[in-house]
Amino acid sequence: MDSTTKYPLPSFHFNVSWEDGKTVAFSEVSGLSIETEVIEYRDGESKNFSNIKMPGMKKYTAISLKRGSVAGDDSLFKWWNTIKMNTVERRTVTISLLNEESQPVITWKVQNAFPTKIDSGSLNAKNNEVLIETLDLAHEGIAVEYAKSE
């Protein structure tokens, strides 16, 4: 096989960090979606009998982060507790997909993120599973950066 063959990137090697540079271990990240709403318009004098479509406002879905619960680590709840009447601690969250050398290949910078939901997971005496907690984030945009390929 040719050594220049390109393969799709695996999605299992990544890291998440807050703007203070602290890396937080998560096992799953979802919701890295960007959508453009469609505006439909038709002028009364238009000779076309259909609407024209124009790009509208950008729409970002909530980001969901999942990790195993660790005894004594209440950092997610401390952040969630910063929510007061009309104020919250907003953070830039950086999510990086890494290569074999743990260097970023794709980086998503989530702007002005804040927690909207924490789910502490389900307790079940019949299961042999890790307790997974989920943090949902609202945000005001995602900037995507690709590393230069050699």
Image: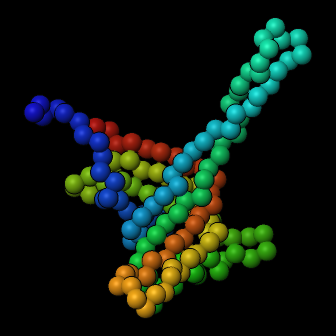
Going by the image, does 81 lie left or right of 3? right
Residue displayed at 29% across by 42% down: 8
Residue 148, x across and y down, in percent: 32, 38
Going by the image, does 115 lie left or right of 124? right
Going by the image, does 55 lie left or right of 33? right
Q: Residue furthest right?
A: 44
Residue displayed at 46% across by 87% down: 124
Residue 141, x across and y down, in percent: 60, 50
Q: Is residue 50 above or below residue 72?
A: above
Picture quarter with the C terminus: top left
Tell me the quarter of the picture where residue 96 sits.
Answer: bottom left
**49 and 42: which is toward the camera:** 49
Residue displayed at 57% across by 81% down: 77
Q: Is residue 125 above or below residue 92?
A: below
Residue 102, x across and y down, in percent: 26, 57
Q: Residue furthest top?
A: 47
Q: How many marks?
A: 0
Question: Is residue 22 in view from this perspective?
Answer: no
Q: Is residue 61 above or below residue 2?
A: below
Tell me the quarter of the picture where residue 35 sits.
Answer: top right
Q: Residue furthest left?
A: 1
**7 and 25: which is toward the camera:** 7
What's the coloring here?
rainbow
Tell me the quarter of the picture where residue 138 sits.
Answer: bottom right
Question: Is residue 3 in view from this perspective?
Answer: yes
Picture quarter with the N terminus: top left
Going by the image, does 85 lie left or right of 28? right
Residue 49, x across and y down, in percent: 80, 14
Q: Is residue 126 above or below residue 46?
A: below
Residue displayed at 39% across by 42% down: 146
